[in-house]
């Protein structure tokens, strides 16, 4: 998930340099959403992995 976020971030940066502000903004928003979702999933899986086995 974080890998896809970085990919969209690179796309946003390239689009911004080339002057495509609409595509850059959209790719930046997608990157931000994927980063947040990936971070939340990482925290959830880290907490779930700490449960003691019975």
Image (spheres, rainbow, N blue to C red):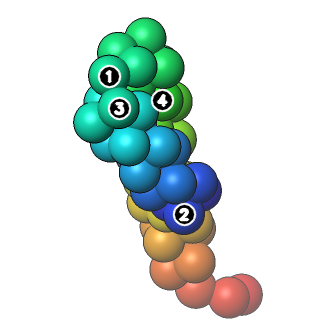
Rendering quarter of residue 16: top left
User: SS at mark 3?
Assistant: helix
Q: Position of residue 45 (x, y in %)?
A: 57, 66
Residue positioned 48% across, 29% down in the render: 27
Which quadrant does the C terminus fall into?
bottom right
Label 1 environment density (alpha carbons within 10 Å; few <14, some 14–19, many ≥20):
few
The residue mark sitting in front, 3 or 2, is 3
Say which of 44 and 15 sits in front.
15
Query: 52 or 20: nearer the eye?
Result: 20
Residue indicated by mark 2: 3
Q: CA distance from mark 1 to mark 2?
A: 24 Å
Q: Position of residue 17 (x, y in %)?
A: 28, 36
Closer to viewer: mark 4 or mark 2: 4
CA gap, disc 3 and disc 1: 4 Å
Circles 4 and 2 in contact, beta carbons < 8 Å: no
Q: Which residue does the image show at 68% across and 88% down from the upper left?
A: 53
Rendered view: 22 above or below 30: above
Q: Which residue is mark 3?
A: 18
The vertical placement of 37 against 41, above or below, is above
Q: Which residue is mark 4?
A: 27
Can residue 25 be seen at all in this image of the molecule?
no
């Amino acid at each position: 998930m974080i890998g896809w976020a970085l990919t969209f971030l690179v796309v946003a940066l390239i689009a911004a340099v080339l002057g495509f502000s609409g595509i850059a903004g959209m790719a930046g928003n997608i990157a931000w959403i994927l980063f947040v979702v990936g971070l939340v999933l990482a925290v959830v899986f880290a907490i779930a992995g700490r449960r003691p086995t019975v």
